[in-house]
Every structure is written in C-alpha cells, then in structure tokens.
Image (cartoon, rainbow, N blue to C red):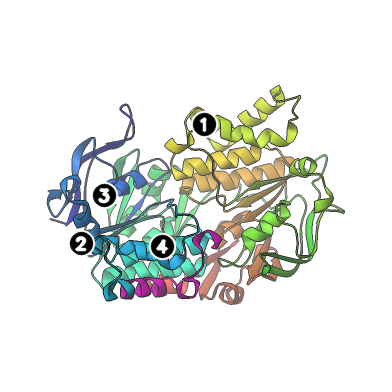
C-alpha cells in the first residue's frame, strides 16, 4: 500500500456537479507522478484534495492508511507540502520572509526560527536560484521569479511528500529545466514522493516515473509515461491529433500537437483592406524606479505578421510589451505606432489600435465572465453612449472564438486557471484592435486550448491582417506559429528575424544558458528544440 492514495473519491464545489468522480488512485512512494489532462478535468481539484484543502463529497484521501481530513493540521503539514496553482503573497513581503513561511509546521507558537529553520530556508533559496533576490519584495519580481519563490517556500517545508500544481508556469527554458531536474533529484536522491500537475506533456514525460491522464474527472490511463503518452491516449484525452516523434540521437520521444494552421505558408492569407500600422522601437530604454530593464533596444515588428518575443525570466519581455501598449513611458528613446510617436496618441485612440493581454490579471472574483469580457469595449464608449449592438456582437464573437460562451454567466472565481485565461483573452479580443499584444497567452492552458488559442491567433492574422506580438516561453510554439522572432537577454536585443534564423542551438545556449539539439519538424520544417539535459535524463 502506498502512503498516499484515494478510494472512491468524489469532489465537487457545488451540490450538482462533481469535478472528480469515484476516483481510486495509488501514488507510488518515492517516485514522481505526473498528472495531465484538459482544463477543468479535475487535476488541480484532485491535488487540493490530496493536500487536504478540499473535503470529499464521498470517498476518502488516505495518508498512511488514515483519512487525511481527520488528521491534525500540523501532522499533515509535516508530511505533505503543497504548491497551489495561483498563490497570493501578502503585500510588500520579501522573498526570504515568504520562504520562511514554509517552516510554519515545524515551529511552536512564539518560537523564533531555529538553526534547522534557517538552514532549510538557505537550501530552498539556493536550489531555486533566489539567494541574490532574498531581500527583494515579491511583488517586484517577474512572473518566473515569483514562481520560483513559491517553489522555494514549498521546498523549505521539507516534507517527504510534495504536491506541485504547474510549477513550471511562467518559467523560461533554463528555469523549467532546473525545476524539472530538481523534482527528479528530490525523488531519486532523497526518496521524496512528488505529485506534479503539468500542462506540458513533454515535461511530464521527461520528469515522471508514473503518469496519470484525467478527463472529465476520471482516469483515462495510468502507468509508465511511454504507455500513457501515446498518440491514441493523447487524442482521447485532449481531442487534438498528436505526433509522437523519436528524437534523433536520444532515447526519448517528443509529442507535437497538430493545429489547423500549421501547414499553411506563413503570411499566405489575403491582404487586409486597411493594413495595421507597424510598431517599432528606436534606442528604447525602459525601467522602474531608475533601474533599467530594457536597454537601448531598436526593433521593428512587421505589420500584419505574428511576432514572438522570447528570452529568460527578467530579460524585459513583459516590460517591453507594456511599453508597446503605451502603459510605460520610455526613459530614453522612442516608440512609434506607424509614423507617429506612440505617446502622441490620445489614450482612447491608442486603445482602439493596440490591445493588451497582460501576464497577470486581477478582477473581483464575483464578476461574471460576461462582465469581464465587456471591459474590452471600454475604448469605444462615452459617458453619453454606454452600450451598443456592436459592443454586444464584439463580445459574442470574442467569447465564441475562445470557447467561453457557455461560461458567460459563471463567476470568475468558479473557473479553472485555464478557463480564466481564455476569459481574459476574450476580453482582449473584444477590444477588436488591429494590433494585439499577448503576454504568455498559453499559460495555464492544456494542450487542446494552447493549440486552439494559437490557431486563433494565426487565423486572425491571416483573415483580418492583425498584427500580433506574443511573449512566449515555449520556443517550439514560437517557431511553429510566428513569422518573426525577437530574442532578448538582460534587456538587450540578441537576434531578430524568421524562426529558422533565430532558433538555433548556439543562440539558445547564448540566450538561455542551456544546451539543446534542434531538428526540423518532419511535417512543417519548423525548428524543434530538445533540451539535452532532459533528454539524457529520460527513461
């Protein structure tokens, strides 16, 4: 019998609909178990139940043969650590203090941190590469740096069982690799049991000893990764055709989902009647509080094309996107929308030209999907003209395109992370701008919805001539869907051009500090990146 298991587990947030139903599962001790499946299938809900955050409607979660919800809180917290999907930190808390919170189960009331507590915090900071950022406020960090801070807090808890919900979200290639290798070490060198929810099937295949594929709250397949991540199982679970390719020179495979638009020639759509103006930067320097983040950057994003911005965490990708949206004035240099300086446009006129999906969004949790999407129509409204049929139609088109029309009356708080991401995307689409800026649009999305979003981006570009600029962490998505790739490092431009010219082995190592092997997708000819360290560790 494994230490952690479920018996006939049914989980629900309402009295009517079960999210997980009659699920019985054994988590192998001392191994890495990866849970995959589409958005809303119950992955995060199951992880919360394993971490005792949700009580079962029926059935049980068993820890050492005892119902976990009947055990004392501190006893559970000393055995089991949990990193949730979207944690929230107290305002102004610094990294070291956040990580110290992982030591709570091991401390008595009013007891100062012990030597063991301090050493555990130091180990966690070092493992996640945050030692130099220990005194930085968490709310000043990039999305990837914040994610590593939360991972460090979970590591500092030093439990024999660790539950991780999307630990690689917002992380660049190097830090994705570090986190995945760390997970393997925790299991293979320290004997820890790790359960990890991942949207990236390839990451799951690389890191897992045991894989579980969920769909509609039930187990579709469970077992060794090479059995679970087969084309038949993946299509049954995600509804997306996939090729599972042998990687040249490596004893591992790679899953490549096949979207509708991948076999089109880039830019083969009809020319729009009114082409979008180009966005360009000249000698651009951006920063916060006098601290430069983007330095002397000059680049032109081609009008009517799809561009991808790639680079490590903290290199200035999101900062550049905020500036392109007119939300951050340059410290030096200039931004141009067409032939006019970007900040010379009136705010509403600019908002009718450029729409932005930021990386982190916030809205009152009681707001409905309909209300959130309606915010995208703000640039077209005046105090004397609040709502029109055109506004309603734009909303309908946006919600239908992103697959959230049937969720329109649901409160935002009731949705999964992937569903919320699609709602925010719908809000940006409802703005109906000729230029669309998307900051990590596939974060929290399962394979099917990643493909759907990227197909939608390509179709809008080809059908309507929209200029799309996306920040992406997935280089393969950039190579498959973008016409133009911008690579950044430490706030500076490293390379810009077609994917075949930018996504090269030498450049991946220069920008991300990781070694890779790049081969051509046999179906599309686009470059495909295989990280060598992960490939060597597969099996």
Main SS of residues in magenta: helix
109 vs 493: above or below? above
Between 465 and 168, the one nearer to me in the picture = 168
Res 387 quadrant in image: top right
Instruction: Indicate left or right for 271 with 446 as reference.
Output: right
Q: Provide the residue span drawn in magenta.
A: 119-141
N-terminal of the pair, mark 1 or mark 2, is 2
Residue on which the image places disc 4: 98
N-terminal of the pair, mark 1 or mark 4, is 4
Residue on which the image places disc 3: 50
The numbered disc on residue 29 is 2
Q: Mark 3 to mark 4: distance in Å? A: 23 Å
Q: Is residue 247 visible?
A: no
Q: Are marks 2 and 4 in contact (CB under 8 Å)?
A: no
User: Which tag is nearer the camera, tag 1 or tag 4?
Assistant: 4
User: Which tag is nearer the camera, tag 3 or tag 4?
Assistant: 4
């Amino acid at each position: 019998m494994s230490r952690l298991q479920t018996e006939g587990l049914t989980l629900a947030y309402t009295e009517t609909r079960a999210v997980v139903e009659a699920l019985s599962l054994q988590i192998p001790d001392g191994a890495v178990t990866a849970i995959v499946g589409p958005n809303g299938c119950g992955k995060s809900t199951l992880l919360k139940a394993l971490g005792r955050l949700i009580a079962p409607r029926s059935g049980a979660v068993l820890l050492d043969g005892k119902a976990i919800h009947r055990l004392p809180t501190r006893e559970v917290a000393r055995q089991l650590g949990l990193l949730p999907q979207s944690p929230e930190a107290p305002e102004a808390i610094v990294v070291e203090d956040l990580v110290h919170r992982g030591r709570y189960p091991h401390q008595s009331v009013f007891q100062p941190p012990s030597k063991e507590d301090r050493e555990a915090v130091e180990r966690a900071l070092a493992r996640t590469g945050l030692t130099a950022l220990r005194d930085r406020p968490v709310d000043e960090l990039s999305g990837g740096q914040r994610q590593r801070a939360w991972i460090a807090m979970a590591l500092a808890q030093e439990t024999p069982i660790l539950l991780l919900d999307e630990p690689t979200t917002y992380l660049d290639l190097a830090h994705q690799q570090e986190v995945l290798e760390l997970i393997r070490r925790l299991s293979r060198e320290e004997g820890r049991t790790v359960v990890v929810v991942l949207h990236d099937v390839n990451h799951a295949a690389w890191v897992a000893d045991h894989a579980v594929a969920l769909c509609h709250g039930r187990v579709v397949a469970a077992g060794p990764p090479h059995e679970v991540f087969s084309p038949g199982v993946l299509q049954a679970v995600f509804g997306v055709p996939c090729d599972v390719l042998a990687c040249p020179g490596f004893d591992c495979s790679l899953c490549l989902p096949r979207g509708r638009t991948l076999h089109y020639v880039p830019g083969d759509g009809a020319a729009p009647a009114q082409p979008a103006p180009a966005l360009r930067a000249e000698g651009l320097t951006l920063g916060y509080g006098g601290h430069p983040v983007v330095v002397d950057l000059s680049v032109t994003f081609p009008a009517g094309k799809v561009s991808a911005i790639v680079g490590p965490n903290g290199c200035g990708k999101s900062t550049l996107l905020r500036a392109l949206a007119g939300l951050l004035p340059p410290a030096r240099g200039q931004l141009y929308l067409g032939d006019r300086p970007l900040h010379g446009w009136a705010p509403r006129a600019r908002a009718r030209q450029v729409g932005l999906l930021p990386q982190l969004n916030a809205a009152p949790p009681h707001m409905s999907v309909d209300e959130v999407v309606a915010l995208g129509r703000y640039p077209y409204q005046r105090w004397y003209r609040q709502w029109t049929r055109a506004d309603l139609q734009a909303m309908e088109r946006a919600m239908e395109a992103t697959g959230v029309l049937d969720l329109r009356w649901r409160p935002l708080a009731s949705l999964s992370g992937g569903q919320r991401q699609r709602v925010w995307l719908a809000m940006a689409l409802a703005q109906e701008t000729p230029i669309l800026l998307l900051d990590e649009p596939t974060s929290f999305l399962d394979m099917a919805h990643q493909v759907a979003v990227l197909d939608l981006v390509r179709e809008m570009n080809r059908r309507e001539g929209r200029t799309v600029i996306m920040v992406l962490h997935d280089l393969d998505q950039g190579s498959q869907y973008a016409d133009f790739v911008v690579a950044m490092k430490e706030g500076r431009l490293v390379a810009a051009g077609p994917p075949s010219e930018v996504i090269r082995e030498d450049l991946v190592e220069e920008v991300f500090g990781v070694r890779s092997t790049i081969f051509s997708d046999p179906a599309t000819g686009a470059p495909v990146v295989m990280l060598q360290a992960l490939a060597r560790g597969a099996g």
